[in-house]
């Protein structure tokens, strides 16, 4: 399914309705994640070594996905295997999906499908950098957007679970980036 650059934005009412539909357990899980509760358990789970068997299971699950779902991931495996290890290591996807190889493979394939759709058939297989040889090298619109957007006031140290933390002023972003297309804003945030 193609990514929509014109997808509607969630209103406050939409968010409230979605929140009302969550079970008490789902709400508690969200709060645990946001406030770092059970952080020791999560950190331990995320620090454990992935076994060769788990990686083999991931590879098998990826292989068994329908061709149309995995074609971009398969292309990446051929065109840029080193990039897979540095930017999209299967370990991250396994941890994200609580070590479920089928779900991790689906997420991995979805990521690569989105990456190709967003960046195109050539740039998607380059590192996500501004440096020479990177997907955003000589992309003047992205560079201009980064110069003009005061959105990211600070990149803070990772939290106790290793997640990136950004200080964002969304009001400022809307003002500074309103002249840029939604697609360009998505590319910008994909880089960040």
Image (spheres, rainbow, N blue to C red):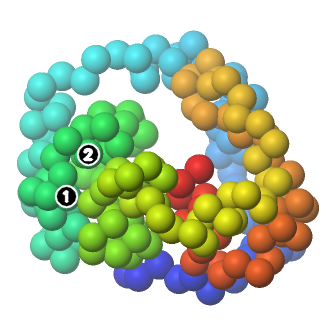
User: Residue 137: which quarter of the image?
Assistant: bottom left
Residue 167 sits above or below residue 189 on the image: above
From the top left corner, tell me how far across and down residue 115 is, in percent: 38, 65
Location of the N terminus (image quadrant): bottom left
Residue 191 seen from this side: yes
Q: Is residue 26 left or right of residue 175?
A: left
Q: Residue at x 25, y 24 (%)?
A: 50
Q: Secondary structure at mark 2?
A: helix
Look at mark 2 in the image and give the residue it sits on. 83
Determine which of the numbered discs, if any, sits on residue 76 in the image: 1
Q: Between marks 2 and 1, how big is the CA–CA gap?
A: 8 Å
- Labels 2 and 1: the sequence-earlier one: 1
Q: Residue at x 27, y 74 (%)?
A: 121
User: Residue 145: which quarter of the image?
Assistant: bottom right
Q: Residue at x 78, y 62 (%)?
A: 148
Residue 24 seen from this side: no
Give 71 or 63, whichever is nearer the viewer. Answer: 71
Residue 76 sits above or below residue 51 on the image: below
Q: Is residue 89 left or right of residue 59?
A: right
Give the crowd class for mark 2: few <14, some 14-19, many >=20 residues within 10 Å: some
Q: Residue at x 43, y 49 (%)?
A: 131
User: Residue 62: which quarter of the image?
Assistant: bottom left
From the top left corner, tell me how far across and down residue 114 is, in percent: 39, 68
- Asked whether the beta carbons under mark 2 and mark 1 sit within 8 Å of each other, the answer is yes
From the top left corner, tell me how far across and down residue 48 is, in percent: 34, 16
Residue 85 sits above or below residue 112 on the image: above
From the top left corner, tell me how far across and down residue 110 is, in percent: 34, 63
Give 38 or 169, whichever is nearer the viewer. Answer: 169
């Amino acid at each position: 399914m193609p990514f929509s650059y014109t997808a509607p934005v969630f209103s406050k009412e939409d968010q409230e309705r979605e929140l009302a539909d969550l079970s008490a357990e789902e709400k508690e899980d969200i709060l645990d994640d946001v406030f770092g509760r059970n952080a020791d358990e999560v950190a331990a789970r995320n620090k454990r070594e992935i076994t060769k068997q788990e990686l083999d299971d991931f590879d098998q699950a990826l292989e068994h996905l329908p061709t149309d779902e995995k074609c971009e991931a398969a292309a990446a495996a051929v065109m840029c295997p080193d990039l897979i290890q540095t930017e999209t290591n299967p370990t991250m996807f396994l941890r994200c999906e609580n070590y479920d190889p089928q779900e991790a493979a689906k997420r991995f394939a979805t990521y690569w499908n989105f990456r190709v759709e967003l960046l195109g058939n050539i740039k998607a297989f380059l590192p996500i950098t501004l440096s020479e040889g990177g997907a955003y090298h000589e992309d003047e619109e992205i560079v201009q957007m980064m110069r003009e957007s005061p959105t990211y006031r600070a990149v803070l140290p990772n939290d106790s679970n290793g997640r990136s933390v950004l200080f964002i002023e969304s009001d400022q972003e809307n003002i500074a980036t309103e002249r840029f297309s939604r697609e360009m804003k998505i590319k910008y945030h994909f880089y960040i």
